[in-house]
Image (spheres, rainbow, N blue to C red):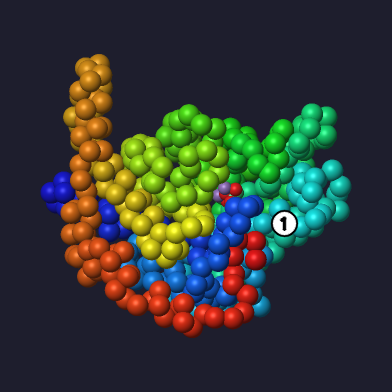
Amino acid sequence: MTELAAVKAALKTQAVETPSWAYGNSGTRFKVFAQPGVPRSPREKLDDAAQVHAHTGAAPSVALHIPWDRVEDYAALAGYAEERGLRLGTINSNTFQDDDYKLGSVCHPDATVRRKALDHLFECVDIMDATGSKDLKLWFADGTNYPGQDDIRERQDRLAEALAQVYERLGDDQRMLLEYKFFEPAFYTTDVPDWGTAYAHCLKLGPKAQVVVDTGHHAPGTNIEFIVATLLRERKLGGFDFNSRFYADDDLMVGAADPFQLFRIMYEVIRGGGFAPDVAFMLDQCHNIEAKIPAIIRSVMNVQEATAKALLVDRDALAAAQREGDVLAANAVIMDAYNTDVRPLLREVREELGLDGDPVAAYHRSGWAGKIAAERVGGEQAGWGA
Ligand code: LRH
Ligand code: MN
Ligand code: MN
């Protein structure tokens, strides 16, 4: 196989999971701008996700968020997804929207609240059993706002206890992905603020516990690719929540704010052997002002473009320059790959898969946007937090 054929073959295997909540209405705490045609149910979210997959060929699974996607029969929902060429992916737990969770969930000082949170996590594993989902994503809004509010160390003990119980409940082919975030909604301490804390918990728990890197969850200037390289080296990188940020947890389209950073991350993924099914590439985004379905298509394409550039890095030339200590030559190898226009290559890849070379244009031509705007009138529109 020529080198270019190998790059194309790798690109054809890439799958990016899209989040159910990205299809629904979302906004900031200031305003949610409703859009016409937004899904009114988990099934309609899957209908939209099927459009993204149909035009990209690279988004075969959809992450659910419980309770936002609560349904009576999860196995039936999985069947509905399958009929549309999709599968249900990661189950995201939600222990942050009840009044009971004001002081935390699994780290709460009161054992009854901790129990309630734990029961929710068990329910999420039950849902995974019904849907065939492999991954449980855990993000906790737990933390404190004021020094002295609670005991930092004891909160870690409570967290460890809850995680251990969930770990016990996992089946052989199920994993838990622990997501960190340095602040928000808590502002003084966060109980899982960084990759080190997540890693320490996952290491104790065992191989089914892995760290998930949400690219929007770091302090400005953080070298995320270094974290990725380290976690992969320790076999503890479970996956990504991709999005991009200018300020804090902006949840904007991945690769929009800093495509160079996304490329650097993807290079470390490939370098570390993470371009494999056990590292989950997921989006965690909200499309507050832009049309949602084409924005998700664009996001998938942005991941593909960063990946194509990372695959094009001349690893032999890079290694040679690094061995010789030729700083400029090594950097030039990286920049040459980054500066390559990979859009024609990706167009070819899509056409070889029988798809339109331009997924956004194909979506606009399909008439889907007009169809859902006409059909989905009335009823509650699903959204972030609905
Ligand atoms: C937290 C987070 C986490 C949640 C999602 C809605 O900021 O990134 O992944 O589940 O947002
Ligand atoms: Mn996330
Ligand atoms: Mn987030």
Q: Residue at x 28, y 70 (%)?
A: 362
Q: Residue at x 38, y 63 (%)?
A: 294
Q: Position of residue 262 (x, y in %)?
A: 38, 41
Please provide percent x and percent y for residue 375: 48, 83
Q: Residue furthest top?
A: 325
Question: In screen coordinates, is 333 left or right of 269?
Answer: left
CB of residue at label 1: within 8 Å of ligand 1?
A: no
Query: Quarter holding the C terminus?
Result: bottom right
**Is disc 1 placed on a helix, strand or loop?**
loop
Identify the residue shown where x is 45% and y is 63%: 292
Q: Mark 1 is on which residue type?
A: Gln
Disc 1 marks which residue?
97
Question: Which of 108/297 is in front?
Answer: 297
Task: Say how many tags the image has.
Answer: 1
Q: Quadrant of residue 352?
A: bottom left
* Residue 15 visible in the picture: no
Task: Tell me which corner region of the image, top left, top right, bottom left or bottom right, holds residue 225.
Answer: top left
Q: Position of residue 264 (x, y in %)?
A: 35, 36
